Amino acid sequence: MESTVNEFAHGHGMRRCRYRGQPKAHLQHVFTAIAVNIERLSGQSSANEAPPARPPTAFQDFLDQHEIPRLTSWRAASG
């Protein structure tokens, strides 16, 4: 949530309103939110494609370099 608010405030200029009056300001906010949602949806991959794998963390690289076995999931450690 905080990243979304930050994106609106800094990336889309929502700190200042272009129009006077609450109804016009509300309309500006709604249209900006619609535009951001469309932008986010256009950047998503299709439903058939798997999302790209995340790169390993520095800790995972360390374990791999020293040939220390690591669990694939933290859930496997509890139990």
Image (cartoon, helix red, strand yellow):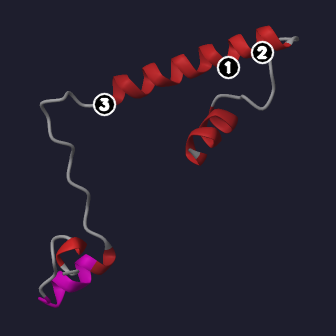
Mark in the foreground, 1 or 3: 1
The residue identified by callout 3 is 44
Give residue 14's mark.
none
Rounded to the nearest angstrom, the CA distance separating label 2 from label 1 is 6 Å
Element type where label 2 sits in the image? helix
77 left or right of 17 in image: left
Amino acid tagged 1: His
The residue identified by callout 1 is 29
Rounded to the nearest angstrom, the CA distance separating label 3 from label 2 is 29 Å
Quadrant (top left, top right, bottom left, bottom right) of the C terminus: bottom left
Give residue 25's mark.
2
40 left or right of 71 in image: right
Position in image of residue 57 (x %, y %): 31, 71
Which region shows up in magenta? 60-68
Whether 46 is drawn above or below 7: the answer is above
Amino acid tagged 2: Ala
Query: Magenta region's main secondary structure?
Result: helix
33 left or right of 16 in image: left
Q: Looking at the image, which is closer to me, 40 or 22? A: 22
